[in-house]
């Protein structure tokens, strides 16, 4: 069973490790020169052990004055070479490590950005942030530290083994009988370190999630005076992390003393056996002490393998978490074909559309479709330039419907066409270049006003930006800022009022100049005065565009060409304001209730 489990791990992670090695191997020139430096370090270490023999035999035993001059010069040369080579290997391997971390961070971010909206609805923001910051940093430690130690210690061990067997091969054979036992802690504790490291990384991700939520919702925390409550919650999470960290510390700390003990047993045996050979005249004092020095140096890199293995296990755990995200499938392959539908042919048709959100527990049992489908049997045709208003109770399916148009989600059954073309056959970049969205919650970036408006079209000139701001009724308040269009607006536009943020979002949509527009309750969060100004801006934005408007305030959509009332994922009523009022149905009742 154990073999099967290891085979499963190999099958699951083989490609991931190959990919990691490929990323590392891209810097083979730096690795080659770093390896040369490591060989020099290893040779210097072996040479320093060998110098003990002539130091004792020639200087202290034979009283050779020439050796008194030669050996110190040789020692200075050896340690100078070792110092220069150590610097070289550290610099080169750190360079490779930083390059690897940069590569993984870029790859992670690029892949996350390309993932479908459903992924972001399921994952926590703090967890994704932890993947890019914390987990990738652990991989850097594995690459720059572990790989360096592995190669350096490997060459060091080879060099010292050569010295040991050259000095006294019989004694060397006995010394190596103890060495294999020193590897036991590496295997036994390595698995525990990896398991606890994974737990620590997950706990750190949870802390990032918590911090992101509490800092983002600090107003809510303070208005409900929940500071003490949040402090206790944070303590619980840090306590959980502390317990996992201490378990990892125990696993790491136990391995080294065990190796120290086993190494001590080996050295004690060498002292007894080697000392007896010196006393009997088989070996010289210098040979024995040089041999003992080399063995003690040899056990040191073996003991370091414990810490090396701990670092590797932590890195492998981080690699697993990183590739769990990297291997997520993007929305759609970005094909190069262009969307050929004319800007003036933006007729949108929903043809027998059914849609439900994917659920891991969904057993595909369609016996009770009404409870499964977010949208059921949607048939709707919207002509180019028409304004369609979607109304109904919250949770009825209005937002789900408009989210299908830019393919934030794919239809489950049926199809949606634009200009007769199935949107599933249209490249995402081409499709979304023709759609603008203004939502209830304005999403802005911590950049200048100018950059936020230009986000709609990066090639827009300053003059075009100002024209868009004027059309969005934003120019006057923007020029009132000390730095005007160069004013930094804060995280999510925190330095602006709700109406100001919304007008900048409208200016951004105007700059994009897309023929299809989605307004998802764009004015519901505004006060009456701000809403009046924003409605004027929206009127400019809607001119000549095929527009879908979601609104709770029915007074704002009376001008629509068509009003669709959606309830429980189905179109219940459809028509103009006058037609629906004359019908005296659900729409009529909603109008009466709002008065």
Image (tube, rainbow, N blue to C red):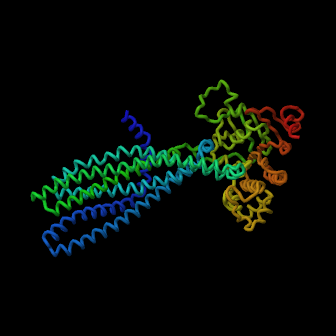
Quarter of the picture holding the N terminus: top left
Residue 331 visible (yes or no): no
Q: In this view, does 201 lie to the left or right of 284?
A: right
Residue shown at the point (47%, 45%) measured from the top left = 198
Residue 365, placed above or below residue 112? above
**Looking at the image, can residue 494 be seen?**
yes
User: Image check: 429 left or right of 520?
Assistant: left
Tell me what residue is drawn at x 77 percent, y 37 percent: 393
The location of residue 274, given as percent across then percent down, is 16, 55
Quadrant of the frame with the C terminus: top right
Q: Give the answer, above or below, for where 414 lies relative to 482.
A: above
Residue 286, above or below 15 = below
Observer-nearest of 560 and 477: 477
Residue 293 x %, y %? 23, 60
Q: In this view, does 414 lie above or below 455?
A: above
Nearest to the observer: residue 132 or residue 191: 191
Which residue is at the front of the view, 9 or 547?
9
Where is residue 542 drawn, in percent x and y?
79, 49
Image quarter for residue 389? top right
Residue 382 position in % (x across, y down): 77, 40
For this orientation, the residue located farthest to the left is 281
Residue occupying the far top of the picture: 367
Q: Give the total of numbered labels.
A: 0
């Amino acid at each position: 069973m154990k073999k099967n489990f290891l085979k499963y791990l190999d099958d699951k992670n083989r490609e991931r490790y190959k990919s990691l090695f490929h990323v590392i191997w891209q810097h083979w020139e730096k690795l080659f020169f770093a390896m040369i430096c490591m060989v020099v370090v290893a040779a210097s270490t072996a040479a320093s052990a060998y110098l003990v023999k002539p130091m004792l035999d020639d200087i202290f035993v034979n009283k050779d004055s020439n050796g008194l001059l030669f050996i110190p010069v040789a020692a200075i040369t050896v340690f100078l070479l070792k110092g220069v080579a150590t610097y070289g290997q550290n610099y080169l391997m750190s360079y490779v490590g930083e390059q690897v971390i940069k590569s993984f961070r870029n790859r992670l971010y690029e892949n996350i950005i390309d993932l479908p909206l459903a992924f972001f609805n399921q994952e926590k923001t703090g967890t994704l942030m932890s993947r890019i910051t914390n987990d990738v940093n652990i991989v850097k430690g594995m690459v720059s530290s572990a790989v360096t130690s592995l190669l350096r210690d490997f060459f060091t061990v080879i060099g010292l083994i050569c010295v040991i067997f050259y000095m006294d091969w019989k004694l060397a054979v006995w010394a190596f009988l103890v060495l294999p036992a020193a590897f036991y802690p590496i295997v036994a504790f390595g698995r525990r370190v990896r398991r606890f490291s994974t737990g620590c990384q997950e706990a750190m991700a949870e802390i990032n999630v918590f911090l992101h939520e509490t800092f983002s919702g600090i107003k809510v925390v303070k208005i409900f005076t929940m500071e003490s409550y949040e402090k206790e919650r944070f303590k619980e999470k840090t306590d959980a992390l502390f317990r996992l960290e201490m378990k990892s510390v125990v696993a790491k700390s136990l391995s080294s003393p065990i190796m120290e003990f086993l190494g001590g047993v080996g050295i004690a045996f060498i002292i007894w056996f080697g000392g007896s050979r010196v006393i009997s005249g088989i070996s010289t004092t210098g040979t024995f002490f040089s041999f003992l020095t080399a063995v003690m140096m040899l056990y040191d890199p073996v003991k370091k393998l414990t810490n090396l293995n701990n670092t590797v296990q932590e890195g492998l755990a981080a690699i697993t978490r990183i590739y769990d995200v990297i291997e997520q499938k993007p929305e759609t392959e970005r094909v190069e074909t262009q969307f050929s539908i004319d800007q003036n042919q933006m007729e949108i048709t929903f043809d027998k559309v059914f849609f439900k959100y994917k659920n891991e527990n969904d057993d595909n049992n369609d016996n009770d479709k009404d409870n499964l489908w977010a949208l059921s049997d949607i048939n709707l045709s919207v002509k180019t330039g028409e304004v369609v208003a979607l109304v109904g109770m919250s949770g009825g399916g209005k937002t789900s419907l408009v989210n299908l148009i830019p393919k934030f989600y794919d239809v489950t059954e049926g199809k949606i066409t634009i200009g007769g073309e199935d949107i599933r056959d249209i490249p995402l970049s081409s499709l979304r270049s023709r759609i603008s969205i203004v939502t209830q919650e304005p999403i802005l970036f911590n950049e200048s006003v100018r950059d936020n408006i230009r986000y709609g079209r990066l090639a827009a000139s300053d003059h075009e930006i100002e024209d868009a701001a004027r059309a969005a009724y934003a120019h006057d308040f923007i020029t009132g800022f000390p730095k005007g269009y160069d004013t930094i607006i804060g995280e999510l536009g925190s330095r602006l009022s709700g109406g100001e943020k919304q007008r900048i979002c409208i200016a951004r949509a105007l700059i994009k100049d897309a023929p299809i527009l989605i307004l998802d309750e764009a004015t519901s969060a505004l006060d009456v005065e701000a809403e009046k100004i924003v409605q004027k801006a929206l009127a400019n934005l809607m001119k000549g565009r095929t527009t879908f408007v979601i609104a709770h305030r029915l007074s704002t959509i009376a001008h629509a060409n068509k009003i669709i009332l959606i309830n429980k994922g189905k179109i219940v009523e459809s028509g103009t304001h006058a037609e629906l009022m004359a019908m005296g149905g659900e729409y009529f009742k909603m109008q009466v209730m709002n008065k």
